[in-house]
Amino acid sequence: MLQQIEGSRAIAETVARCRPEVVCAYPISPQTHIIEAIGAMVKDGRLTPCEFINVESEFAAMSVSIGASAAGARAYTATASQGLLFMIEAVYNAAGLGLPIVMTLANRAIGAPINIWNDHSDAMAVRDAGWIQLFAETNQESADLHVQAFRLAEELSVPVMVCMDGFILTHAVEGVDLMDQELVDRFLPPYEPRQVLDPDDPVSIGAMVGPEAFEEVRYLAHLRQLDALELIPTVAAEFAALTGRASGGLVHPYRLEDAETVVIAMGSVLGTIKDAVDARRDPGERVGVLGITSFRPFPIAAVAEALRGARRVVVIEKSFSLGMGGVLATDVAMSAPWLGQRLVTVVAGLGGRPITRRGIEDVIERARRDDLAPLTFLDLDEGVIARERARMSASRRSGPFAENVLRDLGSATEARR
Amino acid sequence: MTEPTATRVHFYQVGSFAVGNRLLSADDRTVQSNPARTNSIDSGHRACQGCGEALGARYALDAAMRATNDRLVAVNATGCLEVFSTPYPETSWRIPWLHSLFGNAPAVATGVAAAMRVKGRDDVRVVGQAGDGGTVDIGFGTLSGMFERNDDVLFICYDNEGYMNTGVQRSAATPPAARTATTDVVGPEPGNVFGQGKDLPRIAMAHDIPYVATATVADLHDLERKVERAMEVRGARYLHVLVPCPLGWGSASSDTVRLARLATESGLFPVFEAEDGVVTGARRIRRRVGVEEYLRPQRRFAHLFNGAGRPDVVARLQAMADANIERYGLAPDEEE
């Protein structure tokens, strides 16, 4: 039923209809509304049978999920940013053990400097953990991806992370068509674990593995990711047949058919990019968009296919690897090596900085004129950078640089008054 | 008719306090005397000769299996017990067993217990286990959380007073003056410093959980009884078992049980039980010994006795033992 609903609430309602049996939570913005809502549903008996456990840290939240999943329960948790980093050892462990936990990641920047707003640094930090990572463009897609996530996770015995932009999606109220219980039940069968802790059939899980077998065990985990490349489109197609919605899949191409310039991105910024592309299309410019839904596994073949006719590619990403550059762009470059210097990275939206349609149109225009550096930072205030560099040169003890920048911006504001 | 003897019957003719199973009724015999026992941790594992942890874990888990009618899941922290029992492709575990990480065994155990509860399998019980590092140090946060929520888990700490798996480094359970690889016997205060460390059984009691107990591998009947008592209770329970480590302590592998006994008989390791945060019983010392008798066979304390020795340090350790005896009322009958 279509309703105006906050993104977090839509996720909570949808996850509840996936019948999770153990939900473990630790509060961190901007995912708190999700677990608050699920907690209330368990407490008032609307979601039953389900154990809702308030734990003392994200590390415990993922650890409880590991225990619950290994004991055969459908397990769900949610986190963001620092919380994801605090649980990172258990994040790797859940994947290494092949436990089909589903987690919402309400994407948020990582400190220092501490910042609660949206970018993709947290998801990138666990890129290699062995989780499937799906990025939602809208709250509708995020809700739908959660239902698909449990299917994917449990069929493959691989944990799945649904990434949705913090605040931009989690706190946005918009129309979402929530699947009813009967529809979810038709799509998502009960969890049948591949391995389970059972006194009637004892197994050891988590044994020490030495050099004689470690590579094979890791390769098998890699193969399951490759299997996911096959399964993700299949599940999305089945979902589309059931609901009529094109949520999920590996990539979302938009107006790509004759595009010379292709903009690539993940998450909610795709909506803004599409608006910008529509505006450029009107005067006849051949520009299109490729949204990446599945970041891990990375759909190398699908991306290569989508970029076959492209003359230039702009990857707009909300994170970067310090000292190197684009993370998503590196994967795109691996997928379409013939692009060479015709692929550029634009880092944008860090720490919640708005990405506007005008900014993206400007990027597209500069790309068309081949006027973009290989690594460009959108809306970077060069004056602030230069002044702090000058302070650092002038004095050994120039002080904490984030605070210097804030003071600089404050005085600049004063000066304008 | 002769008068009953005024002397209480003592079973320790061999000086070990051991009670032969043949002297006990069938119900009082150790689980290990039953050929049909589970062998939860089976033979063939790779523990060192004389390993106290292997001994303690075998008795504790088989007792837990008997107490739960074989409906048991074990969760293990990283550490010696995990490493010596599972090098691929062998496993010594004949019960469902899960190892996740070093610092999260209590939380993983919570998850297993939650799964069993939600599935209506309340008959399946959960034991979490770790060494002292996994319990008092890196796993302390998750352990305290499990206690505070009163989750239905028995957590067993096999305390060998250091990080033995990584090569004998100091933990917050390492006693003062003990040599470890990170508290070397150099400088004016050789070995581990005084005034640090955690008394985890008392910290556990401060959570007001229903059952806390300590035990050693010197009294395996007592260990089994406490496991069984713990399994009669629902909620968070904690069992702290002293398990001497020949490698880390620098002791003879044949001295494991003797050292555990001397730890209790000197008062350095108090053996007691507590319910709902209140001590309900303590095992009295039978034949009190000075701490020196316990310290001397261990090379980790050798610097206290070389040359002129360090009688001042020994006296401080003796004062700690005396304080334990006072706190828990451990003094033998004769001294009262």
Image: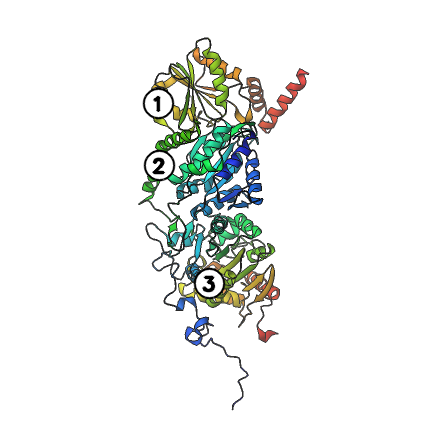
- Please report contact status of discs 3 and 1: CB closer than 8 Å, yes or no: no
Residue A322, x across and y down, in percent: 47, 27
Mark 1 belongs to which amino acid?
Ala
Q: Quadrant of residue B23?
A: bottom left
| Residue bearing mark 2 | A222
How packed is label 1: few (under 14 Cα within 10 Å), some, or many (20 or more)?
A: some
- Of residue B54 and residue B32, the one placed in the foreground of this image is B32
Q: Which SS class for mark 3? A: helix
Residue B176, x across and y down, in percent: 54, 57
Give the position of the C terminus of chain B as an image quadrant.
Answer: bottom right
Q: Quadrant of residue B193?
A: bottom right
- Of residue A137 and residue B295, the one placed in the foreground of this image is A137
Q: Residue furthest bottom?
A: B1
Q: Which SS class for mark 2? A: helix
Mark 2 belongs to which amino acid?
His
Mark 3 belongs to which amino acid?
Ala
Q: Chain of mark 1?
A: A
User: How far is disc 3 from disc 1 in space, using C-alphas?
Assistant: 61 Å
| Residue bearing mark 3 | B67
Q: Does any portion of residue B308 appear in the rendered image?
A: no
Q: Which SS class for mark 1? A: helix
Residue A338, x across and y down, in percent: 33, 19
Q: Are the residues under badges 3 and 1 in a single subunit? A: no
Q: Earlier in the sequence, mark 2 or mark 1?
A: 2
Q: Are the residues under badges 3 and 2 in a single subunit? A: no
Q: Chain of mark 2?
A: A
Q: Chain of mark 3?
A: B
Mark whose residue sits in front, 3 or 2: 3
| Residue bearing mark 1 | A304
How packed is label 3: few (under 14 Cα within 10 Å), some, or many (20 or more)?
A: many
